[in-house]
Amino acid sequence: MDHFLYRDGALFAEDVAISEIAAAVGTPFYVYSTATLLRHFKAFDDALDGMDHLVCYAMKANSNQAVLKTLAQAGAGMDVVSAGEYLRAKAAGVPGDKIVFSGVGKTVSEIRLALEGGIRQFNVESEPEMEVLDAVARSMGKVAPITIRVNPDVDAKTHAKIATGKSENKFGIPIARAREVYRMAAAMPGLEVVGIDVHIGSQLTDLTPFELAYQKVAELTEQLRADGHTIRRLDLGGGLGIPYERSNAAPPLPTDYGAMVQKTLGHLGCEIEIEPGRLIAGNAGLMVSEVIYVKSGEGRDFLIIDGAMNDLIRPAMYEAHHDIIPVVEAEAGAEQQPYDIVGPVCESGDTFAKQRMMPKLAAGDLVAFRSAGAYGAVMASEYNSRALIPEVLVHGDQFAVIRRRPTFDEMINRDTIPEWL
Ligand SMILES: *Cc1c(COP(=O)(O)O)cnc(C)c1O
């Protein structure tokens, strides 16, 4: 459930009418619901009740400072993948011992930054990274807590661009080599092995691949303990999917996921970390856009809207589906017609939906893209010199702009002219 519902035919975010926000900030814009963000965080937190655990929000899904602060105040840790994300987490008030650092390409300066500022653990993805981490930590007189990300070679059965747990993917160390790599890690004085990490992909709509991966992690835990390593923490990654299409069967809930984790790993007595991103932020956000033109083509009608692929790239990049609903609810039984819903960018890929059944719409009408809170604003660009669209956070009957739209002057003045021009 989210908090974007119609009231008397008008779409609301919690207790604020979407049309009121549109009038205040202009379209297009993103709007997030505090209640939904917190509800999703709590669902995961409760699902792991009874096990020592920390929910580390994967902030690459949505890293607006106000979103981070909302979750941090509820007790969330953070999973970061860059220096920028690390500094964002710190700026949102997350202490270093609640920040885990993931990613295949951590640089020396990123490692140094995290060791200086404090870190819960590095999730190490390769042997070269392990060697660098050891050297940097020793040079600073520190010991870096690590897990090693193992690649369990399971098929996540998700879109190829977001599957990460097959042996052909760039992520982690093949699980068959894990014992050898842990032995090497244990011999490095700059490292302290604290556990195992695994993350098999994103937008998984079935628990089976998770369960297969976690069974392999359970076996590995016992082997590594027998080898003399201290395995006290298991980072299980993120990846639980969300229902992008209301008409489809719903993916498993965090409670189902939590019960499966208890069943497969509970007996090991480890501290459990999970790194959900999409499930926390995805359905907590809408992108709202206005119809500029309705254009009749040959055999099809186009809804040309003021949002575009630079604002929300998921359909162009992953062939992703977003439910698109009118901000003024259609009358019950109102006639529907198919539209191709497109943005103004000069690429055919700037298409959000083809032949989508919608109530009849006209220029000036507002539409809302559901499930746009994750991998939406964070992936936006200024392609076609279109300004980054504002983000708005709703809390009950209040709303605030949490990132404003830059002015065109600001955009132009970010560039500098060399003196020879
Ligand atoms: C992307 C990512 C996540 C979050 O994935 P979601 O599908 O958004 O839950 C978690 N951990 C790692 C290492 C990731 O790369």
Image: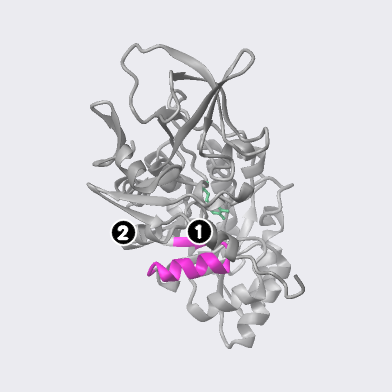
Is 240 left or right of 139, judged from the image as shown? Answer: left
Q: Considering only vertical position in the picture, is 13 above or below 218?
A: above
Say few, some or many: other residues with alpha carbon within 10 Å of mark 1 (under 14 / 14 to 19 / 20 or more).
many
> Residue at coordinates 37% horizontally, 70% vertically from top-left?
93
Q: Quadrant of the N terminus?
A: top left
- Residue at 66%, 42% (x, y): give it: 161
Q: Specify whether residue 80 is painted magenta.
A: yes
Pick whichever of labels 1 and 2 is earlier in the sequence.
2
Q: Which mark is residue 197?
A: none
Res. 132 image quadrant: bottom right
Vertical placement of residue 335 versus 303, above or below = above
- Give, as a three-letter code, the residue at label 2: Ala
Q: Which residue is mark 1?
A: 234
User: Which residue carries the number 2 mark?
Assistant: 74
Q: Residue furthest front?
A: 421
Residue at point 42%, 70% (across, down): 91
Q: Nearer the viewer, mark 1 or mark 2?
A: 2
Q: Position of residue 180 (x, y in %)?
A: 71, 64
The magenta segment is 78-93
Which image quarter is the C terminus in? bottom right
